[in-house]
Structure formats: structure tokens, C-alpha cells
């Protein structure tokens, strides 16, 4: 019989700037399509995680490390009745760039070249980063973090290719994204957005999906949650953050925030406040 007890902790350790930490056991929880500003390095320690990526679905079990680059749309769900248990590092672009510079053999912006690797050593190191951070051992946590990131970059990374905007559709998609970012709280409809950009709704929808891996409304929900996270980080109350980013009320924020981040906004904010 599957263990259906779910738990999660999403937090920051002040002595590890530029890093978010998540440890969790999910069974019924599913992550909708979303992306991250920074990188994902996740050590699966139990069960099976299924990660839906642009290139297909990855099934990761114990000893696996899932690697996701910034702005790559993906989903996640349980791939076994018992769900999955994992310890995740969310390093910022700046932290990855700093470690890459120390290594010295990567040019340009580093990017992972594999979606999932079998690397029990690094998987264990990632769990030890979490353990050291939870125990307040800054020296060990920082040392282990840099060792894990350096190993992943050395073995499974190369220059991240720059995305160039060439086609008219790609230009329209980028312009639509900028409009949605600027008018997040009161966004236009797809028809209005297309009219403003001088294109058709269907053409804009197709171009946006091609460029960002999700339709505009899905991207907007993800962007709202990302902005809400920054507001919560700054100490803004969830109800106020919900309205600021365009959600109708706090329950609306709670639903989408929990699905995408993996914990409710109240718990997220309490961890940020150190309570």
C-alpha cells in the first residue's frame, strides 16, 4: 500500500545566498507547466518522479539527479503509487556563473546538457547540503553546495545557446510577453493582445507556444506566482500580494501558488521570515 503522507519545506538558508531549498514527499501533488528564473538540481531519494520536458518525459528514481536550465517549461508528478521524495537545490544564475567561473573551463552562460543523470554520489551530496543547512552548519553547507554544483557543471554542462529572435512570430511573442509582464494585474484578452500587435489570435497563440513552451494564459499564471514570491520575500502579506499580481483574492493565489511552488504562500512566507 502506498504511503500517501505528503510534506514539503521550501526555504532559504541565509548563509547560502542565491539559493532556494526544497525537500518534499509528494504523492497526489502535480506541478503544472511552469519555469524558473534560475536552475534546478534535484536529487530523487525515493519513489519515482516524472518530469515533463520539451524533449519528452523523464522518469527519475533514487540516485538520479534532475537538471533543468532557466526558463525551460516543465511539469512534474508522481511516477509510482508511493509518489516521490526529493531534495532540490534552486541556484540562481549568479551562483551558477560564480561556480562556473571558479571551474574555469566553461565559456559563456553555462547550461546543463542532460535532463537527468544517474549519480548517487551527487544525489547524496545534495541531501547533505540540506542536512547541513538545517543544522546551521554554514561551512559544510556552502562547501557541499559548491562541490555538487561544480561536479554537475564539469560533467553535464556546456555553453547555454543564446536565443535569437528572427521570425515575425517570435518578435510578436516577445512583444506579447512584455505586455503581459507590464500589465499583469489587468491583462488584455488574447484577441485584444493580438490586435495591439497587428496579428491574429491564433497566430499569436502558436508563436507564443513555440517560443515559451506554453500558451499565454499559462505563462501569465506562472509569471504572477513568480512575482508574488518576490513580494512575499519582501514581507508583503499574501492577500496584498494576490491583488498586486492580478489574482482575484488570496484563495486564488493559494491555489496556483501551491500547485507551482509546492507549498502554500503562508508557509512560504513564514520560512522567509524565519518563523
Image (cartoon, grey):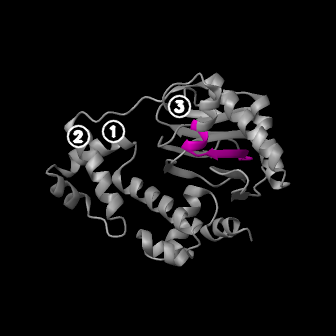
Give the residue at mark 2.
Answer: 169
Q: Is residue 170 magenta?
A: no
146 above or below 87? above
The residue sitting at 68% across, 30% down in the picture is: 150
User: Of helix, strand and loop, which one carries label 2?
Assistant: helix
Q: Mark 1 touching mark 3, by CB under 8 A?
A: no
The residue sitting at 49% across, 61% down in the picture is: 225
The residue sitting at 79% across, 45% down in the picture is: 141
Give the residue at mark 1.
Answer: 210
The range drawn in magenta is 81-97
Q: Splitting the image into 4 quarters, where does residue 97 fall?
A: top right
Give the residue at mark 3.
Answer: 111
User: Of helix, strand and loop, which one carries label 3?
Assistant: strand
Q: Mark 1 vs mark 2: which is more N-terminal?
A: 2
73 above or below 121? below
Closer to the camera in the image, 213 or 186: 186
Q: Residues within 10 Å of mark 3 (few under 14, many from 20)?
A: many
Question: Viewed as shown, does residue 134 lie left or right of 160?
Answer: right
The residue sitting at 73% across, 53% down in the picture is: 15
Of marks 2 and 3, the one in the foreground: 3
Amino acid at each position: 500500500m502506498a504511503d500517501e503522507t505528503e510534506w514539503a519545506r521550501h526555504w532559504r538558508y541565509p548563509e547560502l545566498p542565491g539559493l532556494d531549498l526544497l525537500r518534499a514527499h509528494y504523492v497526489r501533488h502535480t506541478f503544472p507547466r511552469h519555469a524558473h528564473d534560475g536552475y534546478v538540481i534535484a536529487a530523487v531519494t525515493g519513489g519515482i518522479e516524472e518530469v515533463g520536458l520539451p524533449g519528452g518525459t523523464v522518469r527519475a528514481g533514487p540516485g538520479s539527479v534532475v537538471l533543468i536550465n532557466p526558463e525551460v517549461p516543465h511539469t512534474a508528478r508522481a511516477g509510482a503509487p508511493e509518489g516521490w521524495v526529493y531534495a532540490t537545490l534552486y541556484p540562481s544564475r549568479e551562483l551558477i556563473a560564480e561556480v562556473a567561473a571558479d571551474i574555469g573551463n566553461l565559456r559563456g552562460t553555462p547550461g546543463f546538457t542532460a535532463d537527468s543523470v544517474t549519480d548517487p554520489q551527487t544525489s547524496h551530496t545534495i541531501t547533505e547540503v540540506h542536512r547541513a543547512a538545517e543544522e546551521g552548519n554554514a561551512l559544510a553547507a556552502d562547501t557541499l553546495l559548491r562541490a555538487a554544483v561544480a561536479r554537475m557543471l564539469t560533467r553535464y554542462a556546456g555553453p547555454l545557446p543564446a536565443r535569437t529572435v528572427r521570425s515575425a512570430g517570435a518578435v510578436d511573442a516577445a512583444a506579447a510577453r512584455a505586455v503581459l509582464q507590464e500589465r499583469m494585474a489587468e491583462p488584455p484578452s488574447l484577441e485584444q493582445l493580438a490586435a495591439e500587435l497587428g496579428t491574429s489570435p491564433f497566430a499569436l497563440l502558436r508563436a507564443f507556444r513555440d517560443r515559451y513552451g506554453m500558451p499565454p494564459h499559462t505563462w501569465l499564471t506562472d509569471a504572477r506566482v513568480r512575482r508574488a514570491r518576490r513580494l512575499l520575500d519582501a514581507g508583503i502579506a499574501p492577500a496584498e500580494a494576490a491583488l498586486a499580481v492580478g489574482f482575484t483574492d488570496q484563495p486564488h493565489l493559494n491555489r496556483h501558488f501551491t500547485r507551482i511552488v509546492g507549498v502554500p504562500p503562508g508557509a512560504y512566507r513564514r520560512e522567509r521570515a524565519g518563523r
